[in-house]
Image: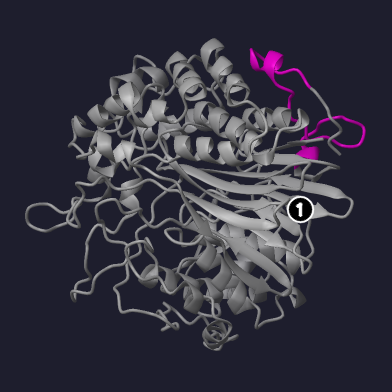
Amino acid sequence: MLRNTFLARAGVVAMLLPAVVLSGPDGVVSAEDLQVAVETSREMVVTANPLATAAGEAVLAGGGSAVDAMVAVQAMLGLVEPQSSGLGGGAFVVYHDAKKKKTVTFDAREKAPSSAVPERFLDDEGNSIGFFNAWQSGLSVGVPGVPRLMEEMHDTYGRRNFFSLVRPAAMTAWQGFELSQRTSDQVASLAGFGDPFFRDPTAREYFLNPDGTAKPAGTMMVNREYAQTLWKLARHGADSFYRGPTARDIVAAVNNDPNGGGGMSRDDLRNYEVIERDAVCLDYRGHNVCGMGPPSSGGIAVGQILGILESFDVGANAPVSVETAHLISQASRLAFADRNHYVGDSDFVNVPVAGLLDEDYLASRAALIDLTADMGTALPGVPPGAVASGADTVDTSNGTSHVSIVDRYGNALSMTTTVESSLGNGVMVNGFLLNNQLTDFSFSPTTGDGQPIANAVAANKRPRSSMSPTIVFDEDGKVEIVTGSPGGSRIIGYTAQSILNIIDFEMDPQEAINTPHILNRNGSTDLEATIPGVTGPDDAAALQAGLEALGYSINVRGLTSGLSIIQVTDDGLIGGADHRRDGAVGGS
């Protein structure tokens, strides 16, 4: 159990923050302890990085709210995990206000600039310019949403001074921190692209050695420009980001990208708004599962997978078995067929959210499942309220992180935050990386037969996402589970399976995370290769053989989720962190 334990850490962070300890009852930390759920009595924060968790834990320990902790966590994540999220990116938040007994969501997704046209990613002959060329140019950069989200949520739900919340990250940036192995590895994988990726001299100097190799883990990193950006946010609010010198620098970087400008204006930044939206909820076996609606496909697709599986006694089988894998794969096929066909920014296109989650419609989809054979590629259904549109399957994001928080006041927050691909667009401005979120749009505005695509590019439109921040409530309306994950379109499967593991298989959060993943995005089925000491024991070869006998095409591969899960019980909080990444749990 975590018992207000403080452990010294190297560098300045040791002076600023309590460390996060995943420990046994005797307080001794061991490799085995990392796979055991953490229990606290009052409050909890789970993130993908120990320093970010420590920042959030310190805020909660001082009486801060879940939103206060989120601000501190996001500020730290943008520094120590820049490959996954930051001020130059976007986020979705599902938030439960305990006092008002109300659950709302916040859409801080990046927006296309006002100059964007449907043919943004087509060449003069009408052919796609390709993902890499779009990614490594100003065309991929959307107007960031994170700074405005931090300010607006803090203004409404914060209890602590904003300055105090970003101070740990700013001081760590100013005095230095050790580069993590994960960040170093991500940089090394991108360094192989050479100059096209590290075309920005600032990013090159920050992440690479003079010979072009990635700086090794343990390198002391100092980012004083980032510290100054945080101080500006604290002193002058988000307007210091969306107006003035920072906005000028962002626009210049986007429009003067050596691989092609993105046509962003200072008005695009000045006019950016975070949108408060209704949560998308579905009843699953007496539990109310609430997630993010469009422009995210996450809440709908997670809800559809669960709603389809409601027709089957999933818990009668073993969690990692041919029977369970078959049901998950078939439900996921059907959900992704609908997702790819219908979901886009609902401010621009009709998304039949209620129809896609309609109980009778989901029962009709479940009836398509043959328990003895893989159905193969699923076709989209025709839910109530549907309007004809064309399908696309674009979704490449993997530069993402997830945060789950419950505070002592009963408030709960689930946030998935991203810069899209690893290290985003690869261009640094004032200490943070720009996103490449617009590559989540379809690269073509229509299908081959001329049908308009729901996720086509348009001016001021937000691209479709798979981010699935989720809060689950019990039959009395009390918060029961806070969950979510990074991982591109695999987020949907990671999140849905985490809920199944807790509800159907009665696992605790860490057991749910440790269970090997089973994923299908309406193509081949991915089975997770066992990671010794991280994922639970299973026989992937036997599972593969059993599924292939049902007609499946199977890939056994690494699946790097980053689940952060909190379970709320009558006796306190139980947390799990994903050690496929650098996840950590904190609380008191």
Say which element carries label 1.
strand
Dominant SS in magenta: loop
Q: The N terminus appears in which quarter of the rendering?
A: top right
Q: Does residue 303 lie above or below 160 as drawn?
A: below
Instruction: Reply yes or no: does residue 20 show up in magenta.
Output: yes
Q: As drawn, is 123 to the left or to the right of 560?
A: left
Can residue 320 be seen at all in this image of the molecule? no
Residue 147 on image: x %, y %: 46, 34
Q: Residue at x 52, y 71 (%)?
A: 332
Residue 162 on image: x %, y %: 59, 27
Can residue 462 be seen at all in this image of the molecule? yes
Q: Does residue 168 lie above or below 329 as drawn?
A: above
Q: Furthest-right residue in view?
A: 26
According to the picture, the residue beneath numbered tag 1 turns out to be: 567
Q: As drawn, is 244 to the left or to the right of 88?
A: left
Q: Residue at x 18, y 55 (%)?
A: 128
The answer to which of 447 and 529 lies nearer the viewer is 447
Q: Does residue 460 lie above or below 34 as drawn?
A: below
Instruction: Reply yes or no: does residue 286 show up in magenta.
Output: no
Q: As drawn, is 286 to the left or to the right of 251?
A: right
Q: Which residues are magenta?
A: 7-34
